[in-house]
């Protein structure tokens, strides 16, 4: 039996999607691998700051096992792993490299500590979309053969929730308020429309001001439990996800699994994740978002087609399939190490 340790970032109350994904994957790998792997989980003791990065690396050095998997966001932690062991790195996106221009020293600290050095150290790198793979190769020069695309999975607890479509005043679910989520252009797109915008996240004062100025009927929610989040999908009529940047775009398939039509961006990875089961728009043009939304609201046949295709699309993102892909990587690396 081989020991496998999943390393997680120090928990933050506002960010938990990576943990949710890999806790489930860890449990499923324990099941599908039988007696092949002994799985355990470790959380890094400190949040990532210049003064704590070294401490987190030292923690990994002390607690590593035969197979180590850094699950994301703290890629530098793999630098604490011994080359004698098998070390796997998951990169969810390259968004940190878009935060600062190359003239800012932080760009280079992040580029080397979070990306270049970790991918060199790893025996295998997994990413959640082809788009992230392309970006990672561009920013790090990582050999393509070293990178494996394994998508996120849909939580099995998401089930179809039949409901009446409120065509007179649809409820639009909008998750996230960071710049890439594109709330400001969405507000412009739905101006003067009889809709209710349900926003999940925390608003900046400028966003509150814009919502008021455009007279948007909205409801703000945050810190929802998983069950409450599933209920919110079921309550909504349409999922609005016109993001300008994502590593994957999990809300797309969560809405599809619930049986809700999805509007998302004509950009990768949203195109690949949505399949043919979403209304694709130009996220940089409010009028494109508006026309796509009106098409979903006004065209019953089109809306029902999106829902039907959504149910088929989510079959590609099942937990067992994803866990087996990770297990196959560990198995291959063990064999390679033995030769």
Image: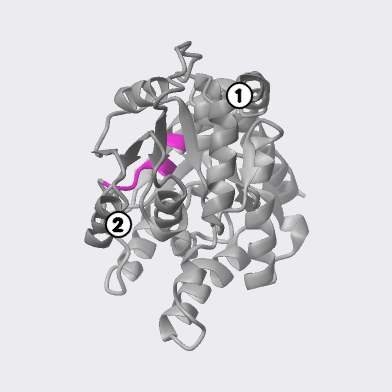
Q: Quadrant of residue 37?
A: top right
Q: Tell me which numbered mark, 1 or 2, is placed earlier along the sequence.
A: 2
Q: Residue at x 54, y 37 (%)?
A: 293
Q: Residue furthest front?
A: 192
Q: Is residue 330 visible?
A: no
Q: In the rendered image, which quarter contains the N terminus?
A: top right
Q: In the rendered view, does 269 fall on the left or right side of 195? A: right
Q: Position of residue 123 (x, y in %)?
A: 64, 56
Q: Residue at x 38, y 34 (%)?
A: 194
Q: Is residue 299 above or below residue 109?
A: above
Q: Position of residue 100 (x, y in %)?
A: 45, 77
Dominant secondary structure of the magenta stretch? helix
Q: In the rendered view, does 201 fall on the left or right side of 337? A: left
Q: Position of residue 272 (x, y in %)?
A: 69, 42
Most foreground residue, 54 or 84: 54
Q: Quadrant of residue 116?
A: bottom right
Q: Residue furthest bottom?
A: 103
Please give the residue where the numbered disc 1 appears in the rendered image.
303
Q: Verify whether residue 303 appears in magenta.
A: no
Please give the residue where the numbered disc 2 appears in the rendered image.
210
How crowded pointer 2 is (Cα within 10 Å; few <14, some 14-19, many 20+) is rated as some
* Magenta span: 14-21
Q: Position of residue 307 (x, y in %)?
A: 60, 21
How many marks on residues? Answer: 2
Secondary structure at badge 2 equals: helix
**Display coloring:** one colour
How much space separates mark 1 and mark 2, taking CA atoms?
A: 29 Å
Most foreground residue, 120 or 322: 322
Q: Is residue 251 visible?
A: yes
């Amino acid at each position: 039996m081989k020991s496998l340790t999943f390393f997680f970032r120090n928990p933050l109350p506002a960010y938990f999607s990576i943990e949710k994904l890999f806790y489930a994957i860890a449990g499923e790998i324990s099941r599908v691998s039988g007696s092949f792997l002994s799985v355990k989980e470790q959380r890094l003791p400190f949040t990532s700051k210049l003064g704590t990065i070294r401490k987190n690396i030292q923690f990994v050095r002390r607690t590593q096992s035969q197979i180590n998997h850094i699950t994301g966001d703290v890629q530098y932690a793999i630098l604490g792993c011994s080359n004698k062991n098998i070390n796997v790195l998951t990169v969810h996106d390259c968004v940190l490299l878009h935060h600062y221009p190359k003239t800012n020293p932080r760009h280079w600290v992040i580029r080397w500590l979070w990306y270049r050095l970790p991918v060199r150290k790893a025996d295998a790198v997994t990413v959640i979309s082809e788009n992230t793979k392309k970006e990672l190769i561009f920013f790090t020069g990582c050999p393509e053969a070293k990178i494996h695309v394994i998508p996120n999975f849909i939580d099995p607890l998401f089930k179809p929730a039949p409901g009446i479509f409120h065509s007179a005043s649809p409820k639009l679910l909008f998750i996230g308020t960071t710049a890439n989520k594109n709330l400001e252009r969405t507000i412009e797109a739905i101006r003067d429309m009889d809709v209710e915008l349900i926003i999940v996240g925390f608003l900046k004062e400028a966003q509150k001001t814009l919502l008021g100025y455009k007279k948007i009927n909205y409801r703000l929610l945050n810190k929802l439990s998983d069950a409450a989040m599933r209920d919110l999908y079921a309550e909504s009529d349409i999922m609005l996800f016109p993001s300008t940047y994502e590593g994957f775009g999990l809300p797309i398939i969560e809405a599809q699994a619930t049986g809700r039509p999805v509007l998302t961006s004509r950009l990768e990875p949203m195109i690949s994740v949505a399949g043919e089961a979403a209304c694709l728009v130009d996220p940089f043009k409010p009028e494109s978002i508006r026309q796509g939304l009106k098409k979903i609201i006004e065209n019953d046949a089109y809306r029902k087609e999106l829902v039907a295709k959504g149910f088929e699309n989510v079959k590609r993102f099942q937990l067992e399939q994803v866990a087996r892909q990770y297990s196959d990587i560990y198995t291959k690396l063990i064999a390679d190490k033995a030769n």
